[in-house]
Image (cartoon, rainbow, N blue to C red):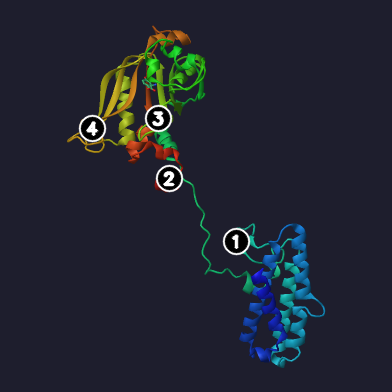
Amino acid sequence: MESSNRSASDAADLVERSLEELGVRDAPGLEALFTQLQRLLHEELGEASQKSPDTARQEARESLRVRWLGRKQGIVRSITENWLRSAPVELKPAIGQRLNALREEAENGLKSNYRVGIADTGVYTTGSIAAQSSRPAAVDALDITLPGRRRVVGVEHPLRRAIREISEIFFSLGYSVEEGPDIESTYYNFEALNIPEDHPARDDQDTFYVDPQTVLRTHTSPVQIRTMEKQQPPVRIIVPGRAFRHDAPDATHAAMFHQVEGLAVDSNITFADLKGTLDYFLKAFFGPQVRTRFRPSFFPFTEPSAEVDISCLFCGAATGCRICKQSGWIELLGCGMVDPALYSHVHYDASKYSGFAFGMGVERLAMLKYGVQDIQLFFQGDLRFLHQFR
Ligand code: DAH
């Protein structure tokens, strides 16, 4: 409001006085004067165009029309009276020209589609979009002293990036992606994976129950069963996705996290294939210097089962450090040969086929690879963290 009053009185003040009083005697002085008027006009037009509701905008435009184009006392009229008439002959043509341009600009600016802001071209403009072609060069000129408009480009979330990097390695080995539901039946999450109702392995996975037969899946392993139900071997799939456990949050635990499951079933698949595949994957993901170690373990759905460690990325397994708990090795994922008990659930001929499976935590892999100390950072949406993955 304030600036509108000030500029209005400035413009009106200017045209009340003669050129002589204003000290304008030559073409450059005239140019500066008209440019100043033009700027004032655009300021006022801009302010009017931002009024709402529509009726207020209409009113503001109407009073601008009277102020600038009014027949008796309008600014344009006053220029004719106070500047043009008494001007030295040699300045008259230039005054007439600039005056016409100003009138035209006021008329165009008062049309309803006047906008201040970003034209369709994405170029910042303070002029009438309709009047662009008729606007004098001084207004069209790009003001290179204005700061540029910064466009914030998003970044891939580090977990998405990890999943992409994992997937690309397995794609190169001929695997494809399968997905399954986050809300899963206890049959797929437990029974079909050889974890019966009273099995102690269920206790390991503090589960969110939706109802007694429905859970938020505690791992991505149920998609092994869902996939084998749909197709006969050969199967080579990975399953990236969310998993849920009733874990208290700390630097390495979250109630929602991500896993990538893997499953390969075919004729003549052996433990050597499992070792070779995971060794290849871990070297491709973490770097060729990484060594792998398979330790016997237990999972209900694999037999035999193993835990895979990699040589510590931080001390190189040489000295031992805080991260590998002085052991030189970092525990990474679970795997094993698919327990033939699973095949009976999906009508695979266990005498013809064999396979291996593995499951890994995406957060864990991402934390190790990207040097993230706290799992919670992945879920807080803090731009200071996320921008570091540019
Ligand atoms: N589902 C297991 C977990 O969440 C991980 C796992 C271990 C998956 C061994 C497998 C596997 O496919 O063979 O702890």
The three-letter amino acid code for the residue at tag 1 is: Val
Q: Position of residue 239 (x, y in %)?
A: 45, 26
Q: Dot 1 surroundings within 10 Å: few (below 14), some, or many (20 or more)?
A: few
Q: Nearer the viewer, mark 3 or mark 1?
A: 3
Q: Is mark 2 within 8 Å of ligand 1?
A: no
Q: Height in image: 138 above or below 115? A: below
Q: Residues within 10 Å of mark 3 (few under 14, many from 20)?
A: few
Q: Secondary structure at mark 1?
A: loop
Name the residue beneath numbered marker 2. Answer: 386
Label 3–label 2 contact, CB within 8 A: no
Give the alpha-carbon distance from disc 3 to disc 2, as whole Å: 24 Å
Disc 4: CA contacts within 10 A as few (<14), some (14-19) or many (>=20)? few
Q: In what element is the residue under mark 4? A: loop
Who's the residue at 75% across and 66% down the image?
Answer: 60
Image check: 389 left or right of 113?
A: left
| One can see residue 358 in this view | yes
Q: Are marks 2 and 4 in contact (CB under 8 Å)?
A: no
Query: Within the image, what quadrant is residue 158 found in?
Result: top left
What residue is shown with label 3? 248
Q: CA distance from mark 2 to mark 4?
A: 28 Å
Q: Check residue 325 in the rendering and tell me which mark sits there, or answer none.
A: 4
Point out the tag, 4 or 3, that comes first from the N-terminus.
Answer: 3
Which callout, 2 or 4, points at the residue further toward the start of the chain?
4
